[in-house]
Image: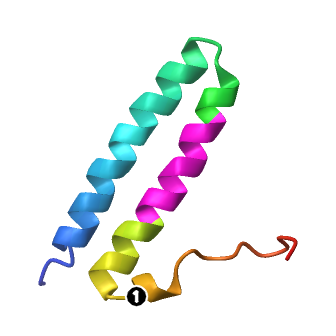
Amino acid sequence: MASTYTPLIRNLDVLHAAYIDAVNAAAEAGDLTRALELAEAYDTDATLMVAEHEGKTHMLPLRRRGAAA
């Protein structure tokens, strides 16, 4: 069976691991505001990484569902 573990998935895994460490460190230090900021930044960075890989950066920034206009 062929592997579906692509360079994009590897890069997303590395990004995710780095953010997990940073979010956990902020939470352990009691800085929940920073932990939440990091979690949101991960979402933005991961979305950008996928958009760049797919050639879809013209669709950014994404609008969140339920966001006010």
Q: Quadrant of residue 55?
A: bottom left
* Main SS of residues in magenta: helix
Taking 18 as reference, is 26 above or below it? Answer: above
Number of marks present in the image shown: 1
For the residue pair 47 and 61, the one nearer the viewer reads as 61
Q: Is residue 44 left or right of residue 30?
A: left
Q: Is residue 33 left or right of residue 57?
A: right
Identify the image's colour scheme: rainbow, by chain, secondary structure or one colour: rainbow
Taking 46 as reference, is 30 above or below it? Answer: above
The image shows residue 9 at horizontal and vertical percentages of 27, 67
Q: Which residues are magenta?
A: 36-46
**Secondary structure under the numbered disc 1 in the rendered image:** loop
The residue wearing badge 1 is 56
Residue 30, magenta (yes or no): no
Taking 62 as reference, is 37 above or below it? Answer: above
Instruction: Name the quadrant of the N terminus.
Output: bottom left
Q: Residue at x 57, y 44 (%)?
A: 39
Q: Is residue 8 left or right of residue 47?
A: left
Q: Residue at x 22, y 61 (%)?
A: 10
The image shows residue 40 at horizontal and vertical percentages of 60, 49
Q: Quadrant of residue 64?
A: bottom right
Residue at the top extreme, as displayed: 29
| Type of amino acid under label 1 | Lys
Residue at the left extreme, as displayed: 2
Neighbourhood count class around disc 1 (C-alpha, 10 Å): few under 14, some 14–19, many 20 upward: few
Q: Residue at x 57, y 11 (%)?
A: 29
For the residue pair 4 and 27, the one nearer the viewer reads as 27
Q: Residue at x 59, y 21 (%)?
A: 27
Instruction: Name the quadrant of the C terminus.
Output: bottom right
Taking 54 as reference, is 17 above or below it? Answer: above
For the residue pair 61 and 64, the one nearer the viewer reads as 61
